[in-house]
Amino acid sequence: MQASPASHVPLATAREEYLSHQQYCRQCNAHGVPCPAAKHLRRVYNNAARAAASAPSGRSGA
Ligand SMILES: [Zn+2]
């Protein structure tokens, strides 16, 4: 049993949330600059990508 933080998000889910946010977020589209929510989602995605890259598991969603 591995101890994973409650905030752990699968890489595919993090990427999907980040990309979908950019589609519906008026602020991101209006200014062309990531809003705080987009920055947060991007950070979650980066963390998930880093975790996936360092994980020794053979399950790759890509
Ligand atoms: Zn946004």
Image (cartoon, rainbow, N blue to C red):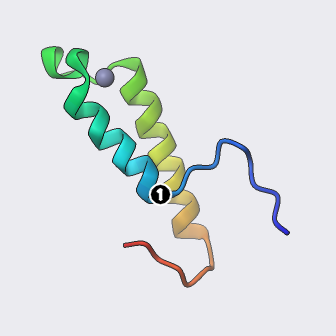
User: Which residue occupies 65% across, 42% down?
Assistant: 7
**Numbered disc total:** 1
User: Which residue occupies 41% across, 19% down?
Assistant: 36
- Above-or-below relation of 35 to 8: above
| Residue lying furthest right | 1
Name the quarter showing ligand 1: top left
- Above-or-below relation of 13 to 51: above
Beta carbon at label 1 within 8 Å of ligand 1: no
Residue 55 at x, y percent in the picture: 61, 71
Q: Which residue is mark 1?
A: 11
- Tell me where residue 42 sits by quadrant: top left
Q: Nearer the viewer, residue 62 or 32?
A: 62
The crowd level at tag 1 (other Cα within 10 Å; few <14, some 14-19, many 20+) is many
- Above-or-below relation of 56 to 31: below
User: Which residue occupies 72% across, 44% down?
Assistant: 6
Residue 17 at x, y percent in the picture: 38, 42
Indicate the secondary structure of the residue bearing disc 1: helix
User: Which residue occupies 28% across, 42% down?
Assistant: 19
Residue 25 at x, y percent in the picture: 26, 23
Which quadrant would the N terminus be assigned to in this image? bottom right
Which quadrant would the C terminus be assigned to in this image? bottom left
Residue 2 at x, y percent in the picture: 81, 65
Residue type at tag 1? Leu
Q: Is residue 3 left or right of residue 54?
A: right
Q: Is residue 41 left or right of residue 23?
A: right
